[in-house]
Structure formats: structure tokens, C-alpha cells
Image (cartoon, grey):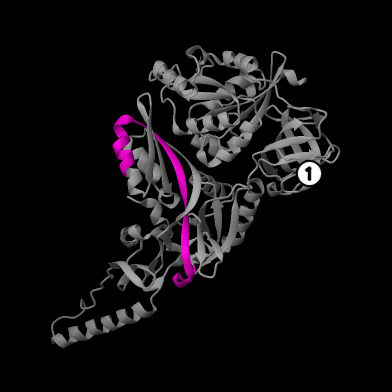
Amino acid sequence: MSQANIRNFCIIAHIDHGKSTLADRMLELTDTVQKRDMKSQLLDSMDLEREKGITIKLAPVRMKYKDYDLNLIDTPGHVDFSYEVSRSLQACEGAILVVDASQGIQAQTLANVYLALAADLTIIPVLNKIDLPAADVPRVSAEVINLLGCKPEDILMISAKTGQGVEAVLDEVVERIEPPRGTSELPTRALIFDSYYDDYRGVILYVRVVDGMVKKGDTIEMIATGAHGLALEVGSLSPAMKPGGDLATGEIGYIVTNLRTTRDARVGDTVTTKRAHTDSQLPGYKLVKPFVYAGFFPVSNDDYQDLKDAIEKLSLSDSALQFEPENSPVLGFGVRIGFLGLLHMDIIRERLEREYNLDLVVTNPSTDYQVSLTTGDELDIKSASELPDVSRIKEIREPWIKGEIIVPQTYIGAVLQLIINKRGLQNNLSYIDERALISFEAPLANLLTDFYDQLKSVTSGYGSFNYELDTYRAEDLVRVDFYVAGGMVDALSVMAHRSESQHLGRMVVDKLKDVIPRQNFQVALQAAIGGKFIARADLSAYRKDVTTGLYGGDVSRKKKVLAKQAKGKKRMKRFGKVDIPSEAFTVMLKRD
């Protein structure tokens, strides 16, 4: 296919605005998929994606339409995967911006528009769900015009569910999006915008060829990682793999390689060939670092090896997943895993439980901290239990984020109060039609557990939130430890700002009191900073009435039996072991 007849584009939208449904209609219209093979959200291949109604893994597909090759990339809408979205945009010349006609512009819509503008793409605005009774076309059109500076006639009205107006979208793609720029005579450069591991074939790369050509059998090299491999098969996706002889300049397709892990071929890397080699890398590559960490422990220690094997298998496909073994006196052997965000963590947990039949205990998620020691050394700690002795610490830095919240104007006060409660700083307040855009900065650790739930509560479900990692800032941070019956439980330790530590300690101790079952002896639950206790709650003992068998007689008989019981309880308190249930390790997630 000549370059002039190729169009590369993607669909960007907030979660649940209908981009996967629009992709379905396009596949039907272009006869890429037969009617009998059609199912809803065809490009969402994982069961989890169908259940949650979100796109987790992006999927490219090639469609034939009026002598044109249309390459579509269906991107994830969630903030955790924004780097993947930015690489997909880099592989395209245009983007279809889908906005729900009933909900209007949301925070993730804005974030993706900024990414598309940064990548210099042609944006085609589309209003979806216009057939809904709640659709407010004039209001949402005004928002889109405000955001993009386009004309009212540039906005396409569609209903992806019924197929109304979808053909006009395809015509606009052909008309308005430029053909790919690139030179076939130059050395080969192809951008990896996704990669995954296939158990039977090895690592499969989804690429966009920028210059030159990749042929079947070529020796290939990844410029950033320096890994070498073979192109065992090349071809396009429609949506099933369709092998071909080569991938020419401007085309999007797949390369089956003999690599064993996606760490050798990361998203954003540049592929070149031995035949037409170059050292010049395509711009924008960065190593994605996880910034949310949680400990995963099997309920039974016999399953530890199964857990380790399962995570190793998952990490072959997901290069952002980082893990290391962890040992806790209470929970036994486990693994500490790094994620891109809470949704990413949720997905991995569900996949481990479903696909590998594991029963897991997941500890409270935390972020990483940078520690400067008095000796001049720098440490990067991923859990509070790794913090060195206070006397050796010069300063502790925690990650801060830049966030954006879009809410109806009536909820501005409640949202600002929520940001202040999380130690956040409001930067800017602007208005999009009837809604407000609040820009703020906040420490990531305070937003990890329940910020999104609280935002949805105070805005009656209308608030939407998007964030990106900003910088690490030095703060007055302390480690809060928790003691159960005098023994420290390191898996419960958390980092907190000194001003919030007392409240946090008291809250967690009260929660533990509800979760830990009562024993035959009194159990003290305590929170401490260093050697100083800041909160305490007592679990009262079960009291067995040992005097039931005594009838009459001298009172000394009764005293004797009670003294014996008290002596036994004292001994129990010395040697008794409190069994801590798995719910105790997720008390932070269950805040009020």
C-alpha cells in the first residue's frame, strides 16, 4: 500500500465514554470482522476488561475502507497507563476525541487532549451517545469548542451503540488526517508502542515503522536496551494476526521475535535492523517507574513458590511490574510489588487470584521515599519497615503530584476542603462553561487509599480526577509503628507527616480493635513513633466464670479459684500468641 493511502489514528476518551464501542462499529462498517464473529468490546480481549467496562491493554487493528488502509489504536483511558497512551499517540497522525454527550468533558479527556496536542496530532472531535435522553448536545458542544477552538460544524454527532453517524467519522479520518511522513530509503526505525509475552511464541511487538522497512527474518536491535533478536514473523492485525512479508514505511503492525521478556523491548523503544542499521533513537522514550508499592503474601506459606512463579510470568508481559522477595515475621514469605497506580495494582491482584488460583493477603499500599543520610548516602525505600535509624537520617523526601479535578461549580467548596485535608495546595481555579477546573498539588501518599472514593462522595459522583507525578519534596515525615500485645508488627508500619501521625495512629488502633478477635487475656494495641507511644486501645479478655461449680462454703474457696485464674491469665499474657487476621493488613484501605 502506498503511503498516501495509509491513515494512522487512535481514539482517545475518558473512561466509559464509548471508545471501544465506536471501534466495534468501525470494524463492522469496514467488514474487518464478520457479523457472526462480532461481539461487544471486541478489542477488549481480557475478561477483566469486559467486566469492569474499561480498556486495560491497548489494541491495534487494520481496516480497509475505500482503497485506504486505516490503522486504529484503541488506547486505555485510565491515568495509570498515560505513558502507553503517549507512545500510541506518537505512532499516529490523528486522534478521534470521543466525548459523552451526557457527561461532557472530564479530567482524563483534558489530559489526553494535552498529550495529543503535544504530539502535534489532528484532532477530530466526536460527540457520542446523542441518542440518550440525558444528552445535552448544545452544552457539551460549547465545552468542546472552548477546549479545542474548533467550529461547531467540525464536531461530529454519533451514537456508537446504534451506529448512527459512524461512517461520517471514517470519511473525516480519510479527509482530515494526513498520510504518514517517513522515508523508505533511510535506515530502519520503528517505534514500539506496545509489547507482550506469548507463552508459545515469545515477545510480540506492536510497532509503527517510521523510516525504512522491517522484513521477515531480519536481525533486529532495540536501541535503548541494546537487545538483539530475530523478526520471526511480521504482519498486520485485523484484529487477528495476519502474516505478511514485510512492514513498510508508515505501516502499523506486529513483529514476532525470539526475545524471552518484554524488559528487552520496552514501550517507547526504537527497533532497527542489521541490514539498514541506525543509532538515532526516536524521541520520547523513558523508563516507566512504579510509584505505588504493596506486599503480596500467600494465605498459606506452602503457596509462596506458586505466587513467585505467577508474578514472574506476569512480569514477562508487563515490563512496568517490578518485584522483590519480602519476609514478615507475622505473614511469612511474600513479594513486594511496584505498580503504576491503584488500578494497576487492582488488576494484577485480580489476575493472580483468578488465573493462578491464589489466596492472597495484600498489605496497605504505600509509595517510595528518598532518604538522605548524614553520611551523604542516598537511599530509596519502598516500605516504612526499611527506614534506617532516625539518628542517621538527614532528610526524607516524598513524591508529590500535580492533579486536576473537574466538578460542577456547586461542589467547589467541598472539593477544596478535601484537598486541604490531604495536605494539598490549590494552584488554580478556572471555569469550563458550568464546571470548574481545579489544579492542585498534593503528597501522593495521602491520595493512595481513598481519595478517589471521597471525591466521588463529596461531588455526588460528578467529579473526575487526573494526575501526574511531579517532584520529591523534603517534609517532616515520621515512621508510625504498631504493636500488638507488646510485639511490633512491621507489616503495619506506615510513613506519615508528623502533623497527621497522632490522628492516623489513633484511627488505625481503633480499626485494629474491631478486626482482631478477643483473646483469653487482655491485649494492648499501641501506635508509636520511635520509642514514644502516641495511641493505645485495649482488647478486653474473655472472662470465664470459674466459680460456677462452687455452692456455699467459706468465701476463701472462691478467692482461691479466682487467684488461680488470675495467675493463669498472667502466664498466658507472657506466652500467649495473638493470631492477627488478614483483614488487619488492609485497615488503611477501609478508612471512614
In this picture, is 131 found above or below 405? above
Amino acid at the residue labelled 1: Glu
Query: Can residue 313 be seen at all in this image of the molecule?
Result: yes
Residue 18, x across and y down, in percent: 51, 26
Q: Residue 47 versus residue 22: which sits nearer the camera?
A: 22
- Is 221 situated left or right of 568 in this image? right
Q: Residue at x 24, y 77 (%)?
A: 546
Report which quarter residue 182 is drawn in: top right
Name the secondary structure under disc 1: strand
> Label 1, on which residue?
221
Up-down relation of residue 535 to residue 74 (above or below): below
Q: Can residue 299 be seen here?
A: no
User: For residue 30, which quarter of the picture?
Assistant: top right
Asked if residue 511 is positioned above or below residue 140 in the image, the reply reads: below
Judge whether residue 411 is colored magenta. Answer: yes
Q: Residues within 10 Å of mark 1 (few under 14, many from 20)?
A: many
Indicate left or right for 219 with 171 as reference.
right
Where is residue 447? Give x, y as percent: 41, 48
> Which of these two is toward me, 463 or 163?
463
Q: Residue at x 22, y 81 (%)?
A: 562
Q: Quadrant of residue 380?
A: bottom right
Residue 431 spot, x, y in % from top left: 37, 28
Q: Say which of 328 and 6 sits in front.
A: 6
157 displayed left or right of 89: left
Q: How many marks?
A: 1
Q: Which residues are magenta?
A: 388-417
Say which of 356 and 490 sits in front. 490
- Residue at (42, 19) in percent of width and height: 142
Which quadrant of the rendered structure holds the N terminus? top right
Queried whether the magenta region covers residue 233, the answer comes back as no
| Residue at image point 53% right, 31% down | 114
